[in-house]
């Protein structure tokens, strides 16, 4: 009956049941979620400032961006994770996974998109910093595993599992993003709409035409190759010094959260190319 009323009015309103309006838990979470959306939009805009730096900084200073990217990513994770923990009580793995996937995928695609136009020294610094951060996370897992004793076994096991999931998610997204972006770029470049897509075959306004596709694909394969090597090294370290099987964690994540990953990567690819349509 309610839907018929909305159809007659010509609009669809999102309403909450009346009993939720008096639920303090719901009202608190709704306020937190509103803050999350607003702050999240701000963090989505901030990387565009890094895009400007890619254009205005001279080549010998571009390497600074390699350190600004992980700093901004860490700050976003720190701020938004607190809101998510308060909303979920810190017990919901799915919410933390979605947050990590959302942040990791956005920055992975940001790097994949910007790397071909960056200076070679900048690209090397970005890749090196990323590999270092993954090794640092692996070291934290090993250190935590060796610290476990009969008094702290439960807390440390939970914390170790969080770190393992975080590492596996980072490796998955960083390995998949360049391949997916390369496939998406191929569809855009060799398809019928390449001439109306900025940074593909259209150079209107602030866009530039991509002339050397070989270099772009080489950079995507380099990113994928480095991440593959990082996975092998980290997996070897974890299997040698802990009881963690990184490939088993990959399987667990894909089996449980494959729909999250599919939707997020689809949304990311859609956003990249929909916003490059010069008709907008």
Image: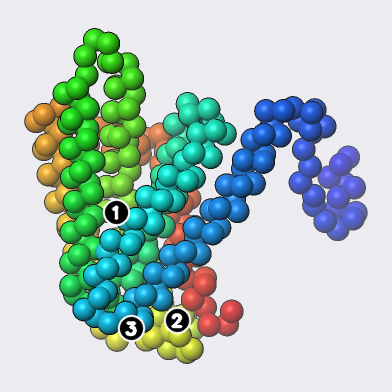
| x and y percentages locating residue 126 in the rendered image | 24, 63
Circle 2 sits in a helix, a strand or a loop, which is it? Answer: loop
Mark linked to residue 198? 2
The residue positioned 44% from the left and 70% from the top of the image is 49
Label 3 close to label 2 by CB (< 8 Å): no
Instruction: Give the colouring mode of the picture.
Output: rainbow
Q: CA distance from mark 1 to mark 3?
A: 23 Å
Mark 1 element type: helix
Which residue does the numbered mark 3 point to in the structure image? 210
Q: Residue at x 34, y 55 (%)?
A: 71
| Residue at numbered disc 1 | 174
Residue 219 appears in the figure: no
The reply to whether dot 1 and dot 3 touch (C-beta < 8 Å) is: no
3D distance between C-alphas at marks 3 and 2: 9 Å
In whole angstroms, how far apart are the C-alphas of marks 1 and 2? 24 Å
Residue lying at 36% horizontally and 81% vertically, measured from the top left? 56
Q: Is residue 193 left or right of residue 58?
A: right
Question: On the picture, is 38 further left or further right than 238?
Answer: right
| Left/right of residue 193 with respect to residue 247 in the rendered view | right
Closer to the chain start, of discs 1 and 3, is: 1
Instruction: Name the residue furthest bottom.
Output: 204
**Residue lying furthest left:** 240
- Is label 3 in a helix, a strand or a loop? loop
- Taking the spot 85% from the left edge, 53% from the top edge, the residue there is 7
In which quadrant of the rendered view does residue 15 lie?
top right
């Amino acid at each position: 009956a309610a839907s018929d009323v909305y159809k007659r009015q010509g609009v669809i309103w999102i309403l909450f049941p009346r009993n939720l309006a008096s639920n303090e838990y719901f009202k608190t979470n709704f306020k937190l979620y509103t803050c999350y959306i607003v702050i999240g939009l701000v963090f989505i805009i901030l990387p565009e400032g890094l895009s400007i730096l890619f254009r205005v900084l001279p080549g010998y200073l571009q390497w600074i961006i390699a350190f600004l990217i992980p700093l901004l990513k860490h700050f976003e994770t720190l701020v938004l994770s607190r809101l998510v923990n308060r909303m979920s009580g810190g017990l919901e793995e799915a919410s933390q996974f979605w947050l990590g996937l959302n942040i990791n995928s956005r920055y992975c695609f940001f790097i994949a998109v910007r790397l071909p136009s960056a200076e070679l020294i900048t690209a090397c610094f970005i890749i090196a910093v990323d590999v270092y951060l993954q090794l640092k996370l692996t070291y934290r897992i090993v250190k935590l595993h060796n610290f476990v004793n009969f008094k702290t076994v439960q807390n440390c096991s939970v914390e170790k599992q969080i770190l393992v999931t975080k590492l596996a998610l980072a490796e998955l997204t960083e390995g998949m993003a360049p391949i997916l972006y390369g496939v998406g770029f191929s569809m855009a470049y060799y398809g019928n709409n390449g001439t109306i897509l900025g940074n593909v075959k259209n150079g209107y306004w602030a866009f530039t035409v991509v002339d050397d596709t070989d270099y772009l694909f080489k950079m995507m394969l380099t990113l994928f190759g480095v991440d593959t090597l990082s996975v092998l090294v980290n997996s070897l370290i974890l299997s040698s010094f802990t009881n963690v099987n990184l490939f088993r964690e990959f399987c667990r994540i894909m089996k449980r959260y494959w729909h999250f990953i599919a939707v997020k990567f689809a949304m990311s690819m859609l956003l990249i190319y929909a916003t490059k349509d010069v008709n907008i």
